[in-house]
Amino acid sequence: MLMHASVPLGYYAAALRVLRKHKASGGRVSEEVISGVTIVVPTYNERNNIIDKLNNVADETKGMGESEVIVIDGGSDDGTADVAESWRPPPWVRLRVLREGLRRGKHVAENEGLSKATEDYVVFTDADSLWAPGSLRAALRALSRSDVGLVTCVKRPLNIMEVESGYRDLYNMLRLAESAMHSTPIAHGELIAIRRDLAIKLGGLRPGADDSELAHRVAMSGLRAVAVDGVICAEKVPRGQGYVEWRGRRAQHLVAYFASALRDLPRAPRGYRRVLAVEAYLHLVNPWLALAALALLLAAASMGQLLAIAVLALVALTVLAIPHARSWALMQTFLIVGALRNIRGRSEVWRKVEK
Ligand code: GDP
Ligand code: MN
């Protein structure tokens, strides 16, 4: 248990130090605002989300010159493409609705969108997500730095979307710290901003944890893939049974992704190498340490060992009492189940869960 906790806690402490230093140095960002952006929205059965999404994109692109929005629909049977076409864009948005005719996977749709994009900068974004005010500008501003190749967002729950600085939760804080060190290997489909020519040069998106995987390849190319405080997005989260399935599939993708990204470790740029090593460890190895410790403790407790019973009680109390510990424990469980499910093969086209 101690070993399971020590690496993440040590990493967390290091991350806090990095962020404090980064903040003190003012976090150098250029003021140049980019125009000329294509926003690619892949959709599969997003009838209930697509109008909110397009309105949000319209708000975010206002005052940036003309922007292109490509909705690329993978054969939705709920009329998503028709609903998207019925939307009246504001004068500064050029809307294109492309129909793939059948569902081929999100990454295929995104690559199709990429090949049709005409502006210099491309932003990929899931239809079931929204951006907080000013996020797109902040993302493009960060992308204007010559050392940055990809920008992603930090995540907020839908009900607290206001822009405010704050490393509100553990995961966002880690992403920001990794970005300050060099790059984060975890990027979010709610907002992935990249130069079009770079995305094409890298060969576009690949199946699975496609967003993170693209960030990884950007980092491997020597450019930085960063999450930016002030680029804030939210996504709709499924409830009940759908939630478990959704988290499970994502964990499965993450496990497969880190297992394969690990092969690049020896060639990873300095700065990024440590981040990749720790994150791969946290996703692939660390959950199993907790499981092993738990099994040992249970065995000892069942034989009447008082110390084991006390430690188990302490762990149970921690998990019950501290929300962060609870979400940590849940994540470990999903990662273990995800690893086991990867042995049976993984899904590139997943069941759509209701949100
Ligand atoms: P999650 O965010 O990982 O839960 O995945 P989602 O199911 O929300 O999918 C992310 C985005 O990709 C959403 O906008 C989906 O509508 C879209 N999407 C998912 N699968 C496909 C597909 O096969 N084809 C197309 N065109 N879009 C897809
Ligand atoms: Mn989603």
Image (cartoon, grey):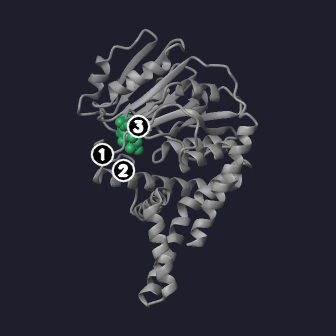
CA gap between label 2 and label 1 equals 7 Å
Rendered residue at 45%/27% (across/down): 40
The reply, left or right, for residue 90 in relation to residue 81 is right
Q: Secondary structure at mark 2?
A: helix
Residue 339 is at least partly visible in this image: no
User: Of tags 3 and 2, which is closer to the observer?
Assistant: 3
Callouts 2 and 1 close, C-beta under 8 Å: yes
Where in the figure is residue 160, as x and y percent of width and height?
A: 44, 36
Q: Which residue is mark 2?
A: 246
User: Of tags 1 and 3, which is closer to the observer?
Assistant: 3
Rendered residue at 32%/35% (across/down): 44
10 Å crowding of disc 3: few (<14), some (14-19), many (20+): some
Rendered-image quadrant of the N terminus:
bottom right
Rendered residue at 37%/35% (across/down): 128
Quarter assignment of residue 197:
top right
The reply, left or right, for residue 77 in relation to residue 100 is left
Give the residue type at disc 3.
Answer: Leu
Q: Which mark is residue 158?
A: 3
First along the sequence among labels 3 and 2: 3
Where in the figure is residue 148, as x and y percent of width and height?
A: 67, 34
Q: Which mark is residue 13?
A: none
Q: Which residue is mark 1?
A: 353
Q: Nearer the viewer, residue 98 or 155?
A: 155
CA gap between label 1 and label 3 equals 18 Å
Instruction: Tell me if the residue at label 1 has its CB under 8 Å from ligand 1.
Output: yes
- Which residue extends farthest top? 91
Give the residue type at disc 2.
Answer: Trp
**In the depicted structure, whether residue 33 falls above or below residue 220:** above
CA gap between label 3 and label 2 equals 17 Å
- Which residue extends farthest left? 78
Instruction: Tell me if the residue at label 2 has its CB under 8 Å from ligand 1.
Output: yes
